[in-house]
Image (cartoon, rainbow, N blue to C red):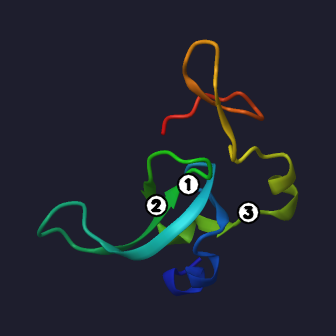
Amino acid sequence: MAAGELDSLRGTLVLDTASGQAGVLMDVMPYAQRPGWAEHPTAFLRPAGGGPEWCTDPRSVSPLPEGARTGMCVHLSTARGPDGKTRCAACRAQLYL
């Protein structure tokens, strides 16, 4: 999708088709990797359960299909596992917060 078309999706769960990952769209804005480099529109996404943000081309962002949401754990509740690590209480995936 074009950068301007993503405004309505900000704060919702979307699909990054470039990586195949789902995440919450945090923002879309011009960004340059290094000072002096050309700025390009960039979409910033974050895992739904928390974790490091990643960036992608806004054209790689699309709404998450409705059917995909039902089978996807978004790690809304956490618990300490027996190993002392933070894990999702629902799917037991280790979370890096």
* SS at mark 3 in the image: loop
Residue 35 location, x and y as percent? 13, 66
- Which of discs 3 and 1 lies nearer the camera? The answer is 3
- How busy is the neighbourhood of tag 1: few (under 14 within 10 Å), some, or many (20 plus)? few
* SS at mark 2 in the image: strand
Residue 4 location, x and y as percent? 52, 87
Q: Rounded to the nearest whole Å, what is the CA distance between mark 3 and mark 1?
A: 14 Å
Q: Say what amino acid the circle numbered 2 marks.
A: Thr
Q: What residue do we see at 65% from left, 68% from top?
A: 12
The answer to whether the residue labelled 3 contacts the one labelled 1, judged by CB atoms less than 8 Å apart, is no
Dividing the image into 4 quarters, which one contains the N terminus? bottom right
Q: Rounded to the nearest whole Å, what is the CA distance between mark 2 and mark 3?
A: 16 Å
Residue on which the image places disc 3:
64
78 to the left or right of 37: right
Q: Say what amino acid the circle numbered 1 marks.
A: Ala
Q: Say what amino acid the circle numbered 3 marks.
A: Leu
Q: What residue do we see at 44% from left, 47% from top?
A: 52
* Residue farthest along the bottom direction in this orientation: 4
Residue 81 location, x and y as percent? 64, 20
| Quadrant of the rendered image containing residue 92 | top right
The answer to whether the residue labelled 2 contacts the one labelled 1, judged by CB atoms less than 8 Å apart, is yes
Residue on which the image places disc 1:
18
Q: What residue do we see at 88% from left, 57% from top?
A: 67
* SS at mark 1 in the image: loop
Check residue 56 in the rendering and tell me which mark sits there, or answer none: 2
